[in-house]
Amino acid sequence: MRAERADWGGLLDPSGSPLPQAHSAAHMQYVRGMPKAAKSSRTTATPDAPESAAGSRAAAQRLKMRRELAAAAMELFASKGYEATTVDEIAAAAGVARRTFFRHFRSKEEAIFPDHDDTLIRAEAVLNAAPAHEHPLDTVCRGIKEVMKMYAASPAVSVERYRLTREVPTLREREIASVARYERLFTRYLLGHFDEHAHHHGNDDPLLAEVAASAVVTAHNHVLRRWLRAGGQGDVEGQLDHAFGIVRRTFGTGIPAGRDTAPSSAATVSDGGEVLVTVARTDAPLDEVMRTIEKALRTRA
């Protein structure tokens, strides 16, 4: 198997093994296969809120138009090639004016990534609603699963989009920029579980938060690329959980469960050195508990 390029940081790997034959009807599935946008609390329709109902209808119409434009762009990219396709042609294929296209997308490359904004909102909602007892790294892993759900909602479309992204440098750059947004979100979240006043020179908490967030994103991207190269087949959720387990074992012990919380485990030894008492959370990894015990024993040796 060919090794991954060390300098590749995006979701998609331009040097991986060849893709399976793209589904010819992928672009036709694009509109109905796209995941639904995250609902806004400001647009929940109720009998007593006609303005909210109108806002919901407007949001639905906007989403429908974005999907139609994205479907038209995918079809033209597949038939004519990315470079040869113009914004005017995409708009015409969708039956709208050029100015309508630019109300929804800033460029033609953005048209094949219409879901990242909504997915980022859903990922942030996962972080904001995390239970107090959950380890922050587990929360981040749950958050990035929203990205995988986006791709898994329509495998044929995702595989075709992967093919295009591998072939067009501009699209690869766009995807890398999207990945960076998730990584920044997760880094900020992990930093929030450290004491902000302790972020002085020589303190490694910010570094650990950034490296851990990057590790979660990298693990996700590794599984995603493998799934896409397999034509969108396989137990991607199981593979993702396995990858996250590796990240959790590697970085989880250095990140506290939250501000002003007790450590996940603690150990004390009696003055006589005969009794060792260990206190640990039920969700503390076994290797973390064992390290705490060993540390206590070494201290009293």
Image (spheres, grey):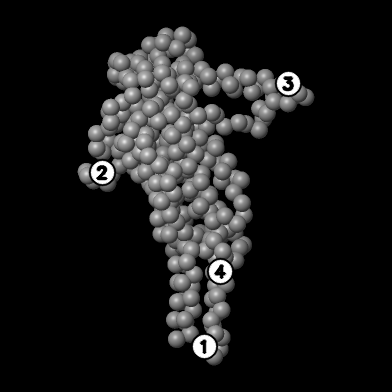
Of the numbered discs 4 and 2, the one sitting upstream in the chain is 2
Q: Position of residue 174 (x, y in %)?
A: 38, 31
Residue pointed to by mark 3 = 50
Density class for disc 1 (Cα within 10 Å; few <14, some 14-19, many ≥20) is few
Query: At numbered mark 4, what does the secondary structure look like: helix, strand or loop?
Result: strand
Q: Which residue is drawn at 71% across and 21% down?
A: 51
Q: In this view, does 40 lie to the left or right of 252?
A: right
- Amino acid carrying label 2: it is Arg
Of the numbered discs 3 and 2, the one sitting upstream in the chain is 2
Residue pointed to by mark 1 = 273
Point out the residue furthest to the front here: 234
Q: Between tags 4 and 2, which lies in front?
A: 4
Query: At numbered mark 1, what does the secondary structure look like: helix, strand or loop?
Result: loop
Density class for disc 4 (Cα within 10 Å; few <14, some 14-19, many ≥20) is some
Q: Between tags 1 and 2, which lies in front?
A: 1
- Amino acid carrying label 3: it is Pro
Residue pointed to by mark 4 = 280
Whether pointer 3 and pointer 2 mark residues with C-beta atoms closer than 8 Å, the reply is no
Q: Could you give the CA–CA distance between mark 3 and mark 4, rounded to whole angstroms? A: 52 Å
- Amino acid carrying label 1: it is Gly
Of the numbered discs 4 and 1, the one sitting upstream in the chain is 1
Whether pointer 3 and pointer 4 mark residues with C-beta atoms closer than 8 Å, the reply is no
Residue 5 circle label: 2
Q: Where is residue 130 in the image (x, y as percent from the top left)?
A: 59, 49
- For residue 164, say whether it is visible: no
Q: In which quarter of the image is residue 164?
A: top left
